[in-house]
Amino acid sequence: MRFAIIGAGWYGCHLATALDALGLDVEVFEQHNRPFHEASGNNQFRLHQGFHYARHHATRIQSREGYMRFVERYPFLSDSVPHNIYAVPTFDSSIDFATYRLIMTATGVDFSEITTSPVPLRNVSGMLATHERVLMLTRSREYFGRKLSGRLKLSHRVERVEDRGSHVEVDGKVYDFVIDATWGHFTRPSVPVFYEPTMLLYYEGPRNFPAITLVDGPLASLYPTEERTIYTLSSVTHTPLGSFATSSEARRCLAAVDGNLVKAKVTAMETQISQYFDDFRERFRFVGPQLSIKTKPIGAHDDRSCSVTRNGRIFSVMSGKIDTIFTATERVLSLLEMRLGIEELSAPLLRSDIVEFTS
Ligand SMILES: Cc1cc2nc3c(=O)[nH]c(=O)nc-3n(C[C@H](O)[C@H](O)[C@H](O)COP(=O)(O)OP(=O)(O)OC[C@H]3O[C@@H](n4cnc5c(N)ncnc54)[C@H](O)[C@@H]3O)c2cc1C
């Protein structure tokens, strides 16, 4: 069975290796000249366990499971974070600390409550120390580049996909199935979405400084990267650059980012984090912006779960976060199996299985 996958981000690459391991024939098309060039290479690199999503049950559960599976399947593609702190601000959080802690206890994720943090934080009413990890970008790129060598078609932007009933054509080449793993940039996902261009800020700071995530609501976080003196600063309020109905509008917005906007974002995000962490400006030095695009489901909820749909021979993946790559694989496999129509299965005849007993 031949599969074409469009997009060499986390989803396309993981799906390709998973299908390959099952003996299926896979080719991955990527418009850039390397994998992980868009969202998968430009994000906060947090291997989520669920602590970020106090307001969405399914997202927390997918993260909790995905985290365990990720660490087992790719132990060399994430690293531990020496101190990984989630702090609930006293005045600005959407929920209070006791509620937050209760939700995380009910989620079944491992944490400990701490009363003092390795860095002095102010205006917070409670803190959890967690085991969330950091994703290793350079290694992931290298690993999948090697693993998919020969099957990764780089610098190939897919223009046309046509379902012919008995097969599907990708730019004229014949496959049995195609998987759109572009996070909604080739075709729109079946769930209603919008496109959010984003700006995170890269900072240089002390080696092995704690990860600090303020929850829950329009708050900020500082997270390490694979390079132990480089961090990303993100802000729910200041990171989004707009909200657009189409991918091309979002791309135009990113292309228009200039030095003045970056300067304004630096001021806004530094001011925000300094409300909780006094000497941020003394300890960290801005090195540059990180630009990316999020594809988000429409709605005020905090849903970041993953879903996959199939229309004929075309699968469409709506990514959650990176930990949900396993959910996507399972969904693709079950949708494939569902092609064996229910009407082809025999009618239930349990009675014939019951052993006759004569006394
Ligand atoms: C600012 C920000 C912070 C985030 N932080 C985190 C985090 O800390 N942890 C986490 O788990 N998740 C995080 N995410 C989400 C995470 O980045 C995404 O869930 C994930 O990267 C999506 O992977 P993907 O493979 O679906 O998409 P992508 O990585 O975007 O890959 C899609 C690929 O498709 C290619 N493509 C598109 N159109 C075509 C075409 N026509 N032909 C060929 N190729 C094409 C693109 O070039 C791209 O390489 C964050 C996202 C953003 C934007």
Image: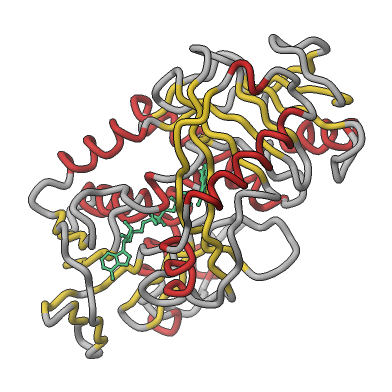
Q: Residue at x 89, y 37 (%)?
A: 99
Q: Residue furthest left?
A: 150
* Left-right relation of 53 to 294: right
On-image quarter of the C terminus: bottom right
Q: State the image coordinates of residue 168 (x, y, percent, origin top left).
A: 21, 81
* Left-right relation of 217 to 337: right
Residue 207 appears in view: yes
- Looking at the image, in which quadrant does ligand 1 appear? bottom left
Q: State the image coordinates of residue 119 (x, y, percent, origin top left).
A: 70, 12
Figure label count: 0
Q: How is the image coloured?
A: secondary structure
Vertical order, 225 against 199 (above or below) = above
Depth order, front residue of 23/248: 248
Q: Residue furthest bottom?
A: 164
In the picture, residue 303 is in which quadrant? bottom right
Q: Residue at x 46, y 36 (%)?
A: 69
On-image quarter of the N terminus: bottom left
* Left-right relation of 163 to 49: left
Depth order, front residue of 336/241: 241
Residue 1 appears in view: no
Q: State the image coordinates of residue 295 (x, y, percent, origin top left).
A: 52, 63
In the picture, residue 137 is in which quadrant? top left
Q: Residue at x 40, y 25 (%)?
A: 226
Vertical order, 107 against 256 (above or below) = above
Q: Residue at x 68, y 23 (%)?
A: 85
Q: State the image coordinates of residue 139 (x, y, percent, origin top left).
A: 28, 31
Vertical order, 218 against 120 (above or below) = below
Q: Residue furthest front?
A: 260
* Left-right relation of 333 to 206: left
In the picture, residue 88 is in which quadrant? top right
